[in-house]
Image: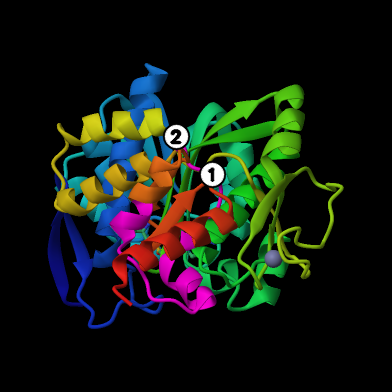
Amino acid sequence: MDTKIIHEGLVTIKTPEFDKVSSKAPVFYNPVMELNRDISVIAIKTYQDELEHEISICDAFGGSGIRGVRYAKEIENVSRVVVTDINPRAIQFANENIKINELNNVKACKEDANILLRKCKGKFDIVDIDPFGTPSYYMESAGISLKADGMICATATDTSGLCGTYKDPCVRKYGAMPLKTEYCHELGVRILAGFIARTFSKYKKCIEILFSHSTEHYMRIYARVKKGAKITDESLKKDIGYILHCENCLNRTVVQGITPKTSSICPVCGKNFKTVGPLWCGSILDQQFIESMLKNMENTKINQEKKVSKLLNMTYEEANGPATFYDLHQICKKMKTSSPRLDAVLESIKEEGYFVSRTHFKPTGIKTDAPVDKLKEVISCLNETCDPA
Ligand SMILES: C[S@@+](CC[C@H](N)C(=O)[O-])C[C@H]1O[C@@H](n2cnc3c(N)ncnc32)[C@H](O)[C@@H]1O
Ligand SMILES: [Zn+2]
């Protein structure tokens, strides 16, 4: 088998040579996910700093072992990393990569992730779930294997379901109704987060989301795990809910709770709301954590530095914004008007005293707590002033 050598972060990795990145590759390695791995290293470093004790990590879908090997090499105070993969050839490569990087705190084993995680009840500070497609099949085992005050890191690449292109798979895998809207990627992150929270809650565990993003073909969530029946009950009441969306006027509203009492009629235009959820309606970004990640970037050698920095800075800006966002082009299309400059719209909304920011989810997105009619008014005013006609 032909092999190639890759340099990511501080490690050197051997993988089989193949033409097309696919789940059928003899051992999976996707160069596009380097950004994901760079962010993971920084997020886990930041979390370890907070914990102030040695950490154990499970890289449950190891592939070539690149994640586990990077975590062991690039993060301080890692007592041990367990790399698992169901593919025996992946474990051969992972073992070779552990040797190449001269690590003695990493073990690789061929095992089904669900079995390994369940065998290791309450053992890990960090569990990384990075499967093909949905992480939903593994979330319960991840919840069992995490310590209180641990951190779950999960990737989902089944974005067509989470974003509502195909509704049925989302209902099946996450028990939630998605919606194809301008902010469907944010809805996807919230559906995934809501699913994690509801799954963990069986074990009296709740989550606080530290960082999340939707990039390329995947979504990724980093969440602190807390233990206790009372805080879990409180979190379910406060952080789980629904988003009601009006496709006619673009008004939307968040309702908290599993069975909220609410009207299905949009109060702005009188049409029926579409209901999305149950989903996570709490915060999906922690500004303080992102600030610490930015600081940690300064002493981390990563190849994707520019992209990571751009993402962290943008998420820092939007972190304290409300759920959902508007899309400038879509709202202008509804208004049958031309689109003013995004900067000008942001400035005008800010002058009116509302929260406003751009969002990493969409280049033309506007995150604001201004009601939809206010946004339309701002756009009309700008067009009147800008249009000589
Ligand atoms: C997306 S790849 C992982 C990529 C890797 N984390 C990286 O960053 O390069 C998914 C991996 O999960 C493995 N896998 C699939 N089902 C599994 C299961 N039930 N338990 C453990 N590993 C599994 C596959 O063999 C594949 O290597
Ligand atoms: Zn409406």
Q: Residue furthest bottom?
A: 19
Q: Residues within 10 Å of mark 1 (few under 14, many from 20)?
A: some
Relative height, residue 106 to residue 362 (above, below): above
- Distance from label 1 to label 2 (Cα)? 13 Å
Residues rendered magenta in the picture: 320-346
Is 329 situated left or right of 199 in this image? left
The one nearer the camera, 182 or 57, is: 182
Is 45 situated left or right of 287 in this image? left
- Circle number at residue 286: 2
Q: For residue 208: magenta?
A: no
Read off the residue under disc 1: 322
Q: Residue at x 76, y 58 (%)?
A: 267
Is 279 situated left or right of 16 in this image? right
Disc with the residue nearer the chain's start (1 vs 2)? 2
Q: Amino acid at mark 2?
A: Asp
Is 162 situated left or right of 41 in this image? right
The quadrant of the rendering that contains the N terminus is: bottom left
Element class at badge 2? loop
The one nearer the camera, 96 or 318, is: 318
- Circle number at residue 268: none
Q: Amino acid at mark 1?
A: Pro
Element class at badge 1? loop
